[in-house]
Image: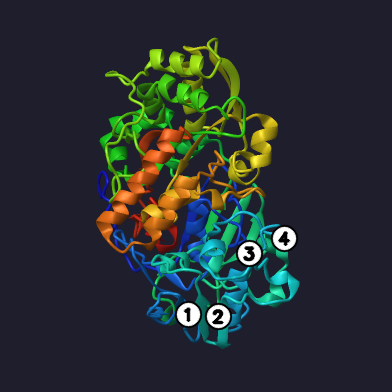
Amino acid sequence: MAGWNAGVGAVVAPSARRGGALRLVASADVDSLDPARTYYVWSWLLQRAMHRTLTAFESSPTGTRTVPDLAEGPAEVSADGLTWTYRIRRGARFENGREIRAADVAHGIERVFARDALPGGPTYLLDVLDHGGYRGPYGGEPCRAIGRPDDHTLVFRLARPFADFDYLMAQPNTAPVPPDSDSREDYWRHPVCSGPYRIAHYEPGGSLELVRNPAWRAETDPVRPALVDRMSVTFGVEVDEMDARLLAGEFHLDVEGRGIQHAARDAILADPGLRARCDNPATGFLQYVTVQTRVPPFDDLHARRAVFYAADKAALLEARGGVGVGGELATGLFPPHLPAHSAFDRYPSGPDLTGDLDAARAELAAAGLPGGFATAIATQPGKFELVARTLARSLGRVGIEAEVRVLDTASYYRTGLGHPGTVREEGLGLGVTDWGADYPTEYGFLAPLVDGRQIKPEGGNFNFAELDDPRVRELIDSARRTTDPEHRKALWRGVERTVMDRAVILPMAHDRTLHYRHPDLTNVYVHPAFGLYDVQAMGVAR
């Protein structure tokens, strides 16, 4: 028995034993099996098992850096920082046995630009590459920013220097896609895998089964140990039922990483044997409430600020799981592991953290709404729903009547809260959500939430508030250009203060999540770049 938090910063039950089946469970389906369209962090961890990328996060409990994956070594970067050249590793193959070529990687990346056909995943490359308005590979033209002088060389041309480019090459949407197998909108049904596992069966909303890819060779893959013979994921299990079946040993792990719910939490913490099988990492995620500027009356700054002052932060943190197990109170945006983190508190909630109701009423009066108003809160089942109902009670104290609307988890960000059209049509003025960095820098954490250039009207949007502020854009661009760490930290704190002044992100907690691991699991650790267990590295003892 490894002990409490043994999988944080270390490996539980290290082993090289191969074989067996890993049984995983989730309350909802993946957002997509198409590597260009996925954005859920737990989907990315499954993608690590299925697909190779140019770089990848190392398989380590301290692995916050990227290492070459399909690339045979580090990028060759020009003196001006605008040209990045990667050499493709020889011998890496798709599941059909064909060797992976530079053109396959280029095609996979070009699909990111086809936003009309393939909405969903991260879009950093649209801003970073010097692509000249490229709209994807389906018009027949290659992207001018991606050179492929031969089968084993890729040359990227950037619009401006971007020191984090290696991190972008570790995202799933850089996975190779054979052009002759690209079925566009239907590619998610059976993507061609290049990692150690391929899809044997997928029933949307029901189950996913991954089996060994016979064409994968360990000697070509420095990242993935590929210990188990198969992985199965059962989708659609209600969260409390999922906890009960985990504790009964039916499943090895909650791959979704939502964490143990309140019903099972107290029983686990009271039982030394069960507690010793748990990890409670600081995930790097921010738990927050988004306030939508395009949904009246939140187009008025004072109406937004009324929500910030009326929120009972003590009750919201308890709804998340309580201080410690559920996380730590957040008053600013950046998580503690990033240099720009500070104790900044733009909207104090009083000594007991239950809110400043006088300040909230003053803001309502300034908005011309002294009697309050009605709105809706978007949320998902489980802890998110509990937070939403707690927030609704908080706001009711000053006359804000908030209806809680529970949306589908699998499509929450694609067609629900993450679709600007849905938000406006349904009047979703508030939304309960969370966010972890796409990669561990201030830009990777905050830019998708607040940079107006990253608003995605087609869905899969994470700038829920549709904030498009010139001062925010100016500060972000300055932070991207500077090479001085202290100046960069100051600029990002300027972004944070500007965003908080605009009152569009109400921080609740710097997240901790209670995870339960089956005693038969080996090679278990929380990956620090994802805040969840690195399922592709796991084995089973029997």
Asked whether the residues under the numbered discs 3 and 4 touch, taking CB atoms below 8 Å apart as contact, a structural biologist would say no
For marks 2 and 4, give the CA distance: 24 Å
Q: Nearer the viewer, mark 2 or mark 3?
A: 3
For marks 3 and 1, give the CA distance: 31 Å
Q: Could you tell me the amino acid type at mark 2? A: Arg
Q: Could you tell me the amino acid type at mark 4? A: Glu
State which tag comes first along the sequence, 3 or 4.
Answer: 3
Helix, strand or loop under label 4: helix
Mark number displayed over residue 113: 3
Mark number displayed over residue 217: 1
Helix, strand or loop under label 1: loop
State which tag comes first along the sequence, 1 or 2.
Answer: 2
Asked whether the residues under the numbered discs 1 and 4 touch, taking CB atoms below 8 Å apart as contact, a structural biologist would say no
Q: Is residue 87 left or right of residue 513?
A: right
Asked whether the residues under the numbered discs 3 and 1 touch, taking CB atoms below 8 Å apart as contact, a structural biologist would say no
For marks 1 and 2, give the CA distance: 8 Å
